[in-house]
Image (cartoon, grey):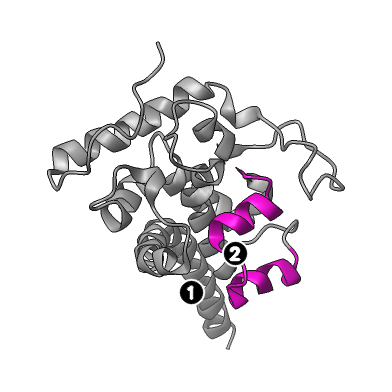
Amino acid sequence: MQPRPLQSGAISNNPAQAEARVTHMAAHLEWLSPSCDLRLRHPSSLKAKYKYRINTMKYDDASWHYGGNFPADLPNEAGATHSGMFLAWALLNGLAGPIHVASEIGILRDRSKTPGQFFMLFSDGKLTDEDLNDEGNAFAAAYFDLQGGKFLADYEAALGAGLPGLYHVPDTWKSYDVIRPVLDRRFAEWEGISLPAQVSQLRSGWWTRLVKAISSK
């Protein structure tokens, strides 16, 4: 059964209603693409010169949004804004995959393209594991996942107030500057969960070496 349109009604400050909106958006995506994790980039992508991998993980695709129930008053590109914000943040914070060269990231630093425009132009409107390095993919899998992560709820809370729906969030650097500290905080929290085991191993190795050095004297 096709989900109801995502843009029904104004945003409420009621947390339960906000959660319901995010849950509905996730259900909408699941209906559009139940096998989304295995889809490939479209051949029109500027990255077509790179060899495709059959097991490419796709986190999101703008066409999943504008290809279904989508606000008639918005251009298709509005379905790329949220992923564009996340990708811009990731690339500007050292999480870029090898397909994104320095000159591309420079466009984001100069802010000569908006996050959504960049996402459509350089990633063909598709967010996959090729866009990110190993650390970026680990974070995206835990946080960005649109059906189980916290990204959509954070996006709603930071940028959704007073708008008809999440697709109406402006694709601007002003919007990015609002969501950026939220992403910074979430990444720091995620690192705090992910790093202790690694740090423990490093400390263990360092302590072992120190004890051996002292014992040998």
Q: How many marks?
A: 2
Is 124 part of what is drawn in magenta?
yes
**Residue type pointed to by label 1:** Trp
* Residue position for label 1: 207
Q: Position of residue 213 (x, y in %)?
A: 57, 82
Residue 73 lies, with reference to residue 68, above or below; the image says below
Residue ID at (59%, 64%): 91
Q: Confirm whether residue 122 shows in the render.
A: yes
* Residue position for label 2: 91
Residue ID at (72%, 60%): 100
Rendering quarter of residue 19: top left
Query: What is the chief secondary structure element of the magenta stretch?
Result: helix
Q: Sort mark 2 into few (<14), some (14-19) or many (20+) by Cα contacts within 10 Å.
A: many
Q: What kind of element bears circle 1?
A: helix
Is 151 part of what is drawn in magenta?
no
Q: Position of residue 174 (x, y in %)?
A: 41, 69
> Is 3 in front, or is 78?
78
Q: Which residues are magenta?
A: 101-127
Residue 135's label in the rendered image is none
**Residue type pointed to by label 2:** Leu
Q: Label 2 vs label 1: CA separation?
A: 36 Å
Residue ID at (50%, 42%): 79
Q: Confirm whether residue 61 shows in the render.
A: no
Rendering quarter of residue 117: bottom right
> Is 94 in front, or is 4?
4
